[in-house]
Amino acid sequence: MEKNKLVYPFVAIVGQENMKLALILNIINPTLSGVLIRGEKGTAKSTAVRALADILPEIEVFENDPFQLNPEDEFDFYQECMLTIYGKKISSLKSVKRLNRKVRVVELPVGATEDRVVGTLDLEHALKKGEKQIEPGILAAAHRGILYVDEVNLLDDHVVDVLLDSAAMGVNTIEREGVSFSHPARFTLVGTMNPEEGELRPQLLDRFGLCVLIEGTREPEARVAIMERRAAFDEEPAAFCKEWETASKELTKKIEQAITLYPKVIIERQLLFEITSFCLDVGVDGHRGDIIMLKTAKTLAAWNDRQEVVSADIEFSAELVLPHRVRRQPLQEIGENVKNLRENK
């Protein structure tokens, strides 16, 4: 691997355990609807998200498919895509080569235009051949993967609207010059932001299943470890990544085991009232918080190699699910209140 393609290993990040766990939970269960990481500069927010690529599990895809479609469930879409975009008729599933590759982390630049996000017409093809052909956008590449938005609070409003629509419907529609084409766009939305640079629109804030508030560590030992590891990576990135390769593979294996276990996890009805109690106590609007807390608690159980949810799962999930769903106080203060509520339960 080339030096410039090496990224700092996820397992080598010092501290920030809640942030790392929130990301892992979304890998295990993409229906958690992503995570918003809020914190000051230099707290490994972007490093952690970009490092996800190495620990993500593999998925099956069609060869050379720009839409990352699932061969088992989305062959009809694949036929339509190939016909619409490339003019190719695909007769049967057996005639298409399939392969396994890791889930992708697709980054959305802050200044991305709507055409770049949604997709547009391939003007070069139209000029050369006189045919209208779709050029897939970022949402096509993010299907079944992770869409990472750094400085998500600085996105243009019209791009935010596109993300909201796709996140809600799981479908992206490209409409240009009389051509209308839709394709699946189900992705895990991961956003990072520095609150000092402005807040998020409430509609987008509520789309994130989990929210983590992070800050730099005040422990001298941890700060020294951060310096030492970063210096070692900058000097010899290949050797540093090799040193953490075994730990990365072990983490990937644990994630895959939790993915397999998650459908078997059960929760007693009595514990559902505990979830409701947390949401009512902090004044959460609507029911999205209750549902995401249930899913998070079950995912935590799977991560901890259990088939049954316990109260500790619910208590911890409250810290991840509730802070950004109460808008009557600053998020930092809400986070502290949820933590205190958990400790007093």
Image: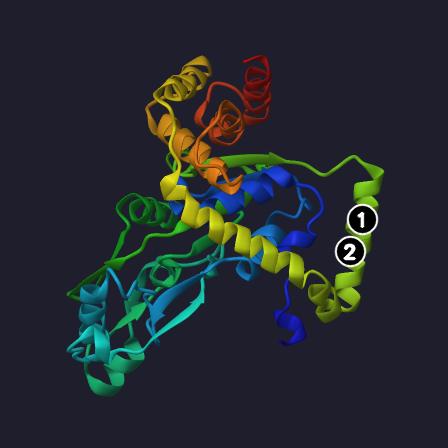
Residue tagged 2:
229
Q: Which image quarter holds the C terminus?
A: top right
Where is residue 295? Give x, y as percent.
40, 35
Q: Is residue 155 visible?
A: no
Where is residue 231? Give x, y as percent.
80, 59
Which element carries disc 2, helix, strand or loop? helix
Residue occupying the point 59% across, 26% down: 332
User: Label 2 to label 1, Cα distance in Å?
Assistant: 6 Å
Q: Amino acid at mark 1?
A: Ala
Where is residue 65? Give x, y as percent.
32, 72
Q: Amino acid at mark 2?
A: Arg
Q: Is residue 20 visible?
A: yes
Q: Is residue 253 above or below residue 221?
A: below
Disc 2: CA contacts within 10 A as few (<14), some (14-19) or many (>=20) = some
Residue 225: mark in rendering: 1
Q: Quadrant of residue 117?
A: bottom left
Look at the numbered discs 2 and 1 and tell me whether their residues touch, using CB distance below 8 Å.
yes
